[in-house]
Amino acid sequence: MWFNGSTTLTGSYSGGLSTPYSVFVTDNSDVYVDNGNTNYRVDKWGWNSTSSVPAMYMCGQCYGLFVDINNMLYCSLSSYHQVIYTSLTQNLNIWTNVAGVSNTAGSTSTTLHSPYGIFIDKYLNLYVADNGNNRIQKFASGQSNGTTISTGAITLSIPTGVILDSDGYIFIVDNGNNRIIGSGPNGFRCIAACFGSYGSSSSQLYYPQSMSFDSYGNIFVIDQYNQRVQKFLFLSNSCNTTTTITTTAATTMMSIIQTTTASTSVSYSNVISFNQPKFGAYATWDSNGITFANSSTVGTSPYGIFIDTSNTVYVANKANNQIQVWLSGSSIPTRNITSGVTSPYSIFATITGDIYVDNGYTNNRVDKWVSNRNISSSVMQVQGACYDLFIDINNNLYCSMYSQSQVAIKSLNGNSSLWIVAAGTGCSGSTSNTLDNPRGIFVDTSLNLYVADCGNDRVQLFLSRQVTAMTVAGSTATGTISLNCPSDVALDGDGYLFIVDNGNNRIIGSGPNGFRCIIACGSTSGSASNQLSSPSTFSFDSYGNIFITDQGNSRVQKFLITTTTYNVTTNQPNLCPSTTWYTNAITFANSSTVGTLAYGVFVSINNTVYVANQQTNKVLVWFEGSINPDKILSGSLNTPYDLFATPLGDIYVDNGGSNGRVDKFSFNSNLSIPAMSVPSTCIGIFVDISNTLYCAASNSHQVVKKWLNDNVLTSTIVAGNGTAGSTATTLNLPLGIFVDVKVNLYVADCYNNRVQMFPVGQLTGITLAGASVPGTITLSNPNGVTLDGNGYLFIADCYNHRIIGSGPYGFRCLFGCTTISGSASNQLNQPVTLRFDSYGNLFVADRYNNRVQKFILASNSCSLSYNQPTFCYNALWYSSASTFASSSTIGTSPYGIFIDGINTVYVPNRVSNTILTWSQWSNISTTNTYSNLNN
């Protein structure tokens, strides 16, 4: 910070910041600073304060900050392609999207691509430097459709800043063209650094980043690649329209430490030549690959593969010193490139058909074959083999030099064959600025570089022009996945990462719910159609099929996309906080139908009811509205506990007690087949939206799963370790299970009297209910567990003979709230499983009453605070009241009372200065003590 007129630093703000990108100061001198890099927030320093407080929480860096006249704080989330805002007058850490679509880069009127600087005028119109689309977008107040500001004959390249003068004219930091653009009544013109080339003289800029006016009209510019702040003095304010004044000389205010590497091109010119399909959250591929080409065609140990948008396939045949080309639909190569090539590792083809080939193994260069010609020319001198090649949208060529632990970059717009460093120092290392035997690379449209850092078992992301990286996959990146020498990396159309996990012989994909294995998930090397051996590279075709160079098997494998996914697999009604059910249940089925000790009950999304009869070893099926079973399925079942029916009508039934498996009855089939091998009885069964089958193997103290789209019966552990325990990584007799749409696993951990939640991909559970966790509820041998549409938990609290529900106000008892077992219609005796139908009615397996009970939804009112019942004109109440609470509980001279929407009663005790609460159905109060209460 510099005070007005000062040339020396007056003060600074620090403490807890991590790579701040932007700053904004309000008229009362509050300072807002981006702190989103690792801390995911915007911090605020009040006037004369030496410490900061969080002002907004978000998911990434704010490349631009702004506070408008309504005291709304805006953040330009470049990495998420959106602008968000939050009110500074409310103490809510909640933001709203104001422009762009989260995680969706686009060029439509409603989307943005890597937005940077922002400005909000006095009419609350939002202006955005839409960096990746080379445009300035204006979003009228309250509108999500932007309009592109016309700059006339001036073409923008990667704009990073935008600001308005008092007349509403626009000024732009034209980063890629190294200049400042301004508008006026006669349109746009260049006003600073107008020579068209970067440089370090006082009249030049080198990738300027942002700008700001002082009160005199002088322009301050962050001259990023010159590591300085430039001040362009205001020369003239003549309004004579025939006079053009340009400020060209600048004074240097300060120098900053270099943290970036040079870019070699600033002109967006290339159309993407490779495929980036968009997939659903749980896209799946056939587990058995088709051999596209074997060793007789591609030789031994083929390495590189590339597929263009026309589905032409290019393979680097390293053993035979050639590049082979298959036109779309062809089963044999239609072209071979051999001239002067030695042990090629990689290839890249442009949209025009030019082919770039690694020729660095002995010749230390990259060659280019012009489209449909048989002669090549050298375009880049390198120091060894390029294990991958890539050309970005700015026509820069990248080479991943494995032996040098570097990625090199060179512009193809000039004649020079020299390169500069894009990533790595040339020395193997594991720090954020070093690499160890890098292999596959990918550059997105924001010019961010992804590197498969094989020797460090990680994938590194180098943001555009940065020489230090963040780890986005690997054991050191929390919440991702462990890797073993990743050898290739690519992004799909939504920006999700796909990885060739070479050392683990598998392919990894990511999505909104994290990382998962998608191909060859046994992780063992092999030559079967569902196995890989040291896979090296991969490429998508336009349909989303995946081609892989299976190096150890000397073949190219093609895995077809065959998605089987569901939006939901079980009923999850949207329930309000004050939802009630009739406490007297209807007996849906008794012992004469379901046998004794009823356990498994399931209600499908079309309200078909399924019950496992343990006595007869059969599955009973009622279609919606039926009183008696419509179907009875027999198989080689032995005391089945639980069952699950998918939206397609397939039924999965526990058969683990003596047969060690889960069986499947296909839709409309009376015959069962094995679906998964399990270590013990599955007292809980679930199929998630990605078509993965889960089993709570209770006696083995673990939960196992298996993807149903392959033919392997083997299951893998997803929770517990096989030994009874009460730690975060162990279970003790897990029973009911549930998997939400984010693939988080919920487990009723019976003997630990708790419900555990295991986030997707994690083996460490979080206790959500029971086990003396503050703010939840005490449980005794919980069994069934399910979620409503809002993600709130419902639990069969077995040994307390009751059903528990949760909501925004916490947990409450729904049925059997006396905790005394019984057989009346409002009682339960060790309830085990519970399922909603689509209407919100709840089916409960009432085990020791030998019946299935149905609790009818009474009200789903979303009135959250107080009650307003509807009465008839002649409504009556009993004239004699019962005493709900006496002076021994509420003290003398009680005054206030309140009953909320879920029938919790509140009474102030004026004597003890406490607030007493009674949950619905309870006759015992809870005393709540608050400070500073008096009478």
Image (cartoon, rainbow, N blue to C red):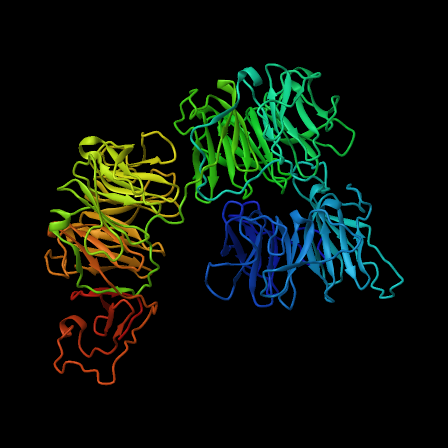
Residue 37: horizontal and vertical position, in percent?
A: 54, 45
Please state which of residues 304 and 202 is positioned toward the viewer in this rendering. 304
Judge whether residue 550 can be spotted in this image: no
Residue 398: horizontal and vertical position, in percent?
A: 65, 30
Looking at the image, the residue that sits furthest to the bottom is: 874
| Left or right of 307, for residue 787 | left
Instruction: Place residue 370 in its image quadrant.
Output: top right
| Left or right of 350, for residue 80 | left
Quadrant location of the C terminus in the rendered image: bottom left
| Left or right of 192, for residue 103 | left
Judge whether residue 350 can be spotted in this image: yes
**Residue 403 in the image: above or below residue 156:** above
Please state which of residues 63 and 528 is positioned toward the viewer in this rendering. 528
Instruction: Place residue 531 in its image quadrant.
Output: top left
Residue at 64% across, 23% down: 334
Residue 245: horizontal and vertical position, in percent?
A: 85, 57
Please state which of residues 591 and 896 is positioned toward the viewer in this rendering. 591
Residue at 77% across, 57% down: 182
Quadrant location of the N terminus in the rendered image: bottom right
| Left or right of 592, for residue 402 | right
Residue at 48% across, 22% down: 534
Q: What is the number of callouts on the image?
A: 0
Residue 173: horizontal and vertical position, in percent?
A: 72, 51
**Residue 98 in the image: above or below residue 679:** below
